[in-house]
Image (cartoon, rainbow, N blue to C red):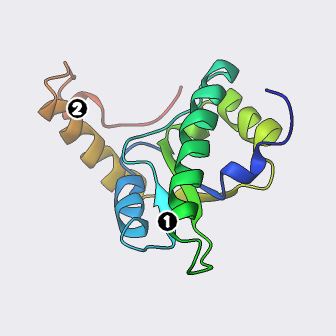
Amino acid sequence: IIGDISWLLDFAIIGFPKSGTTFMKDYLNQSNETYVYEREFCMKQPSDVPNLVRHYHDAHLKLQQSLKDNYKKINFGLKCPGVLYRKHDLNIYRKYFPRTRLIIGLRHPVSWFESFYNYQSYRNVSLPPTNQLIGRCGP
């Protein structure tokens, strides 16, 4: 990538899985002043950045062209839960999108665990019984 691409991304909805990122994406997409890609758009390695550039450049052209007579600015964002536990993801934001505002989803740890456990169970992921997951953390 040659040149400044930071203008493509105004904000990113990040956090941990099951911390409200989908709700925030859906809420922001109700406005005609924001665009958030329908699915998760995570950049886990530098080679993922060109895909974002292609998609968001096309979205900028299409949406800004349709609003050129209204003089409205559309804020472009993406949703990617999991950024906070993958250090290299934040490095990609720092390098390519240093001015992007981060919306961070947080949730109480107990309700997060309950939701995440139920979600994984619903997906038929093999999980230990909850009574084996209760107790002290660490030694």
Left or right position of 53 against 119: right
Q: Residue at x 60, y 24 (%)?
A: 48
Question: Is residue 109 positioned above or below 130 on the image?
Answer: below
As helix, strand or loop, the secondary structure at mark 1 comes to helix
Three-letter amino acid code at the position of disc 1: Ser
Residue at (57% x, 38% y) in the render: 83
Residue 14 shows in the view: no
Q: Image quadrant of residue 133? A: top left
Residue 44 screen position, x and y as percent: 59, 26
Which residue is at 69% across, 22% downward? Answer: 46
Residue located beneath label 1 in the image: 66
Query: Depth check: 72 or 5 in front?
Result: 72
In terms of image quadrants, where is residue 89? top right
Mark 2–mark 1 Cα distance, whole angstroms, equals 41 Å
Q: In terms of sequence position, does the residue under pointer 2 or pointer 1 come before the other?
A: 1
- Residue 113: which numbered mark, if any? none
Image coords of residue 131 (percent x, y): 20, 33
Compared with 71, 10 (above or below) is above
Residue that mark 2 sits on: 120
How many other residues sit within 10 Å of disc 1, few (<14), some (14-19) or many (≥20)?
Answer: few
Is 39 on the left or on the right of 71, as rendered?
left
Q: Callout 2, which amino acid?
A: Gln
